[in-house]
Image: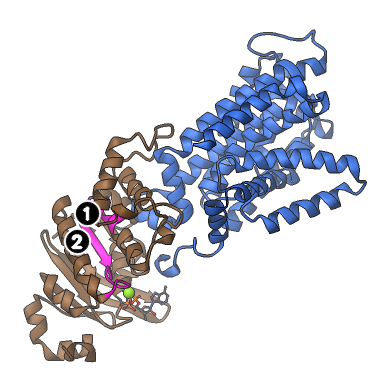
Amino acid sequence: MILVAEGLRKLYGEFCALDGVSLGVGAGEFVSIIGPNGAGKSTLINILTGLTPPSAGTVRFKEREIHGLGPVGLARLGMARSFQLVHIFPDLTVLETLQAAVVARLGRGTRLFASLAGDRDVQREALEVAELFRLSDKRGALARHLPQGDKKLLDVASAFALRPEIILLDEPTSGVSTADKTAVMETLVEASKRIGLQAILQVEHDMDIVFAYSDRIIALHQGKVLADGPPSAIQADRYLIDTVIGRRARTH
Amino acid sequence: MTGPLVVAAAVVAIALAPLVASTYHVLLMLPFMAYAVVLLGLNLLLGYAGLVSFGHALFIGIGAYTGAFLTSHFKIRSLEVILIAAAALGALVAAPVGALCVRYVKIYFGMLTLAFGMVFYTFVLKFYRLTGGDEGTPFLRPSLLGRSLEAMPKTDYLVGPYYYYSLGVVVVATLCMWRIVHSPFGLCLKTIRDNPAKAETLGIGVTRFRFHAFVISAVYAAVGGALLGPPIGNVDPTLAYWTHSGNIVFMTLLGGFTSFFGPVVGAFVFIYLQNWVMSVVPYWRLIFGAILAAIVIFAPGGLLGLVRPGRAAVRAAGRRGAGAPPAESRP
Ligand SMILES: Nc1ncnc2c1ncn2[C@@H]1O[C@H](COP(=O)(O)OP(=O)(O)OP(=O)(O)O)[C@@H](O)[C@H]1O
Ligand SMILES: [Mg+2]
């Protein structure tokens, strides 16, 4: 297991957003977290990525307790993420955004007088990622001017540019049109192979996508893990489908 | 590729100015060049790291007093030594001040830098025996590149050797800063300005980069501050007063912080406009203030934003709203 969480609790005042969540993600796994709105999925991702401290419980990444590491430390250890609400650098171009990730990964941010344009490694890798995510046509565009779907893609692409071992994606296809969702997922899978990614943990609402791509599914409901198993087991559980996904899934 | 041409033309024009312009106007170029250095540094903080300091007069003061002390008390006249000492002292003072300030952002950062500026101002004002209090300390004429130039009449010295020396410092400072903002370091600063939460998830240590930017900007302010001294001939606490910090922020906004040369243009316009208004109307502060306010209102991207609308204006306007990251991720 690369990433292991035990007994995670998160309290917002009186409100308990996560109530004793334990999970693990192993090498080679594609794990999806599902659950209704407000189930605590984003809270979970934010705790696993060191952005939010848990009220109780522990997270271990590569056998190491992440407490106090924070997002910067985790990124250096090999964890990357994207956000549910797109996080981009509005005034940077697509290419600059990817370059920033590569610069950070190679630890070249302290090169004060070096030329960014003359840094072959950074230029090449950033372009590679842009091509991988089909963003190379738009590489000169400011991130703020991209259509919503591309902003999301750029957020995800910059996470991949870190060449992490694990990546946590909070709804990577939200804001992407239904027709494009599969294309985005295909890109993700291809990119994962290319960079040698070990594991993906994603939050996803689209059940077709979830069932098609996941090795394992974790169902979250009111801050608790309701089920954790392969897609076949989840699909077979009528009660679970009803509570976690509701009406939407039954119409399929 | 008109950019490099314009810059080259500007440097040539500045170099030729003493041959054609009146002594009066040439003398005004000296504070302009000193401020150009200060503002290049200040804009690394404002335009590239997104932090507004209201305390940079502190570092101007450090640089100016370094020169005054060295020339008056230590008999060191070499301007090269003075500039290096100013830079070193600027960095030395900026390290603890910056370490504390960069933990805060926005108005809190601004207020903290302002507070440190006040402390320093009070220090130089009250420690009479060291600083000469409100009378200040003389900044004796520095030697340039090992030549004393003591015998020259003051004006000849200022519009001649000192002028070209300042221009040299501005050119070197500009080239260094150009490299810095186009380096991997500069890119990391911009990510932090645009979205610190996202920058952290990429492994970019926000506080550390802000700290480095702060120290670099302080070094620039100190060097510029040291250059301000010789034309005045005396360094007093007004250089370190908070209104001075405000003025340089204003110059930056005036020219436009979204472009590399914007603040430098701002300094030029500020100095010459102030001088012109002072010479034609009695209530010059009123008129000057109104003109500056009008420029900010009608050219929110600064003066360079007018010349190059597109990007600068959009960015200046956008910074207020869309630039902020969504609140979701903040713990
Ligand atoms: N910072 C916060 N302060 C207070 N309550 C919060 C905070 N963040 C989240 N919550 C609450 O915790 C619960 C879980 O939120 P979370 O964002 O994790 O849900 P989610 O499963 O990601 O939902 P969605 O599908 O809408 O993204 C929600 O009820 C939310 O209102
Ligand atoms: Mg969510």
Which residue is identified by label 2?
Answer: A187
| SS type, badge 1 | helix
Looking at the image, residue B228 lies above or below residue A1: above
Q: Quadrant of ligand 1?
A: bottom left
Q: Chain of mark 2?
A: A
> In the displayed structure, does residue A101 sit left or right of residue B70?
left
Q: Do badges 2 and 1 share one subunit?
A: yes
Which residue is identified by label 1?
Answer: A132
> In the displayed structure, does residue A9 sit left or right of residue B268?
left
Across and down, in percent, residue B311 comes to: 52, 52
**CB under 8 Å between discs 2 and 1:** yes
Of all chains in the rendering, the one displayed in blue is B
Identity, as a three-letter code, of the amino acid under mark 1: Leu
Check residue B211 for magenta coloring: no
Check residue A166 for magenta coloring: yes
Dot 1: within a 10 Å radius of its alpha carbon, few (fewer than 14), some, or many (20 or more) residues?
A: some
Q: B280 and A208: which one is in front?
A: B280
Extent of the magenta region: A157-177
Identity, as a three-letter code, of the amino acid under mark 2: Thr
Which residue is found at the position 65% from the left and 42% from the top? B56
Looking at the image, residue B151 lies above or below residue B215: above
Which residue is found at the position 38% from the left and 50% from the top? A140
Which residue is found at the position 20% from the left and 57% from the top? A166
Which residue is found at the position 17% from the left and 75% from the top? A210
Separation of marks 2 and 1 at Cα, in angstroms: 7 Å
Total number of numbered labels?
Answer: 2
